[in-house]
Amino acid sequence: MPRTLHLIKHGQPTLVPGVPAHEWLLAPGALDGLPGLVARLDPRPGLVACSEEPKAKATAQALAAALGVPCRPMLGLHEHLRYSQEVTSPDEFQARFRRFFAEPGQVVVGEESADDAHRRFANAVGAVLKVNPQPSVAIVAHGTVISLLAARANGLDAFALWDRLKCLDVLTLDADTLRLREPSP
């Protein structure tokens, strides 16, 4: 039976102006949809790995507890680097990321290009799968890097996938090929 990889976007964070996104915590009620997420994980993962960012780590810990499986934060699963990104209007945020995905070799938002973020995240996902042989593994990470990986492996528009991927959404993939097993959100 092929291995399964569930890529899960963290719960809704509290956006804090002047605080880098990688330091944001989960918003109140961010995990209210966790039972629905657990119900969509088929097959159920035997492990939850995650980014070390607080919003992803808290989501992963709650998910692992609900599933009764280990939770392992791992390096390299963090979001696209954007330490200098300030909170902007939704329209400006969308415009910036449309350009980010359209110009993947250029650093157009933050401090890391889409190509660099994809390469780093793909390597980290590969490492998670290599050291954790469970038949089904979940990784709680971030919308931008999840979209880059899934879109490139499946010939999809990365911006469109990113735009549709909501907090606590999951993409279920074949762990070996990274091909989507279910329709994207």
Image (tube, helix red, strand yellow):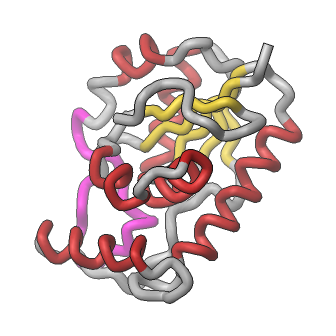
Residue range of the region highlighted in magenta in the rendering? 14-29
Q: Quarter of the image containing the N terminus?
A: top right
Q: Give the answer, above or below, for where 52 lies relative to 68.
A: below
Is residue 60 shown left or right of residue 116? left
| Foreground pick, 80 / 99 | 99
Quarter of the figure with residue 178: top right
Quarter of the figure with residue 45: top right
Q: Residue at x 57, y 14 (%)?
A: 67
Q: Residue at x 26, y 45 (%)?
A: 27
Is residue 160 shown left or right of residue 68? left
Q: Residue at x 51, y 77 (%)?
A: 104
Q: Residue at x 42, y 29 (%)?
A: 183
| Foreground pick, 85 / 120 | 120
Q: Give the answer, above or below, for where 141 lies relative to 67.
A: below
Q: Give the answer, above or below, for where 169 lies relative to 147.
A: above
Is residue 30 shown left or right of residue 170? left
- Residue 29, x across and y down, in percent: 23, 33
Magenta stretch containing residue 18, yes or no? yes
- Residue 182, x across and y down, in percent: 48, 25
Q: Quarter of the image containing the C terminus?
A: top left
| Foreground pick, 176 / 35 | 176
- Residue 16, x across and y down, in percent: 24, 67
Q: How many numbered tags mark residues here?
A: 0
- Residue 138, x across and y down, in percent: 61, 31
Magenta stretch containing residue 91, yes or no? no
Magenta segment, principal secondary structure?
Answer: loop
